[in-house]
Image (cartoon, rainbow, N blue to C red):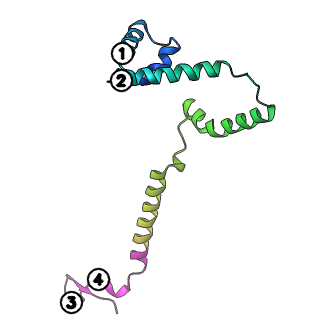
């Protein structure tokens, strides 16, 4: 959890959000590390300034806009959280597979339908013998 410095934990340390063990380690580190102590002083200063800011309620029109934006942005996430899988028809893998299958079927259909009749070999029985000979239709 701890690297060389504890600067990322200074806010949690100031607001007493760390466990006793981690709080003690941060305190010991702050005693010996000037750069982390400077960062901690900035956090303390910012927290004290924030404590003096007045609390002002946002206008209702602003809240409606925020709620509408959240409803639109969170709708797909809510559907996934409810356990409904997203539709297979809107997934890229399905679209590419369908397109490849359509092209393949159309290619085979064109190949067999557009072949010239002269390329087909026809077996016809010989009049004089019991064997068949291969002739091309004319």
Q: Are marks 1 and 2 in contact (CB under 8 Å)?
A: yes
Q: Say if the magenta span includes residue 116.
A: yes
Front residue of 129 and 18: 18
Check disc 1 and report the residue beneath it.
Answer: 29
Query: What's the distance in space between the residues labelled 1 and 2, CA to CA?
Result: 8 Å
Q: Residues within 10 Å of mark 3 (few under 14, many from 20)?
A: few
Q: Are marks 2 and 3 in contact (CB under 8 Å)?
A: no
The image shows residue 135, relative to residue 103, as above or below, that is below
Check disc 4 and report the residue beneath it.
Answer: 121
Query: What's the distance in space between the residues labelled 2 and 3, CA to CA?
Result: 103 Å
Q: Position of residue 17 (x, y in %)?
A: 50, 13
Circle 4 sits in a helix, a strand or a loop, which is it?
loop
Label 4 vs label 3, nearer the camera: 4
Query: What's the distance in space between the residues labelled 1 and 3, CA to CA?
Result: 110 Å
Looking at the rendered image, the quarter that the C terminus falls into is bottom left
Badge number at residue 128: 3
């Amino acid at each position: 959890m701890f690297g060389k410095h504890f600067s990322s934990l200074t806010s949690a340390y100031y607001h007493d959000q760390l466990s006793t063990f981690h709080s003690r380690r941060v305190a010991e580190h702050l005693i010996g590390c000037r750069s982390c102590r400077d960062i901690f002083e900035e956090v303390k200063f910012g927290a004290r300034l924030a404590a003096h800011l007045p609390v002002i309620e946002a206008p209702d029109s602003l809240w409606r806009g925020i709620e509408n934006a959240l409803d639109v942005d969170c709708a797909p996430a809510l559907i996934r959280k409810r356990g409904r899988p997203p539709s297979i028809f809107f997934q890229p893998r399905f679209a590419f597979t369908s397109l490849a299958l359509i092209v393949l079927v159309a290619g085979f259909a064109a190949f067999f339908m557009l072949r010239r009749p002269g390329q087909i070999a026809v077996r016809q029985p010989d009049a004089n013998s019991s064997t068949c000979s291969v002739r091309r239709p004319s």
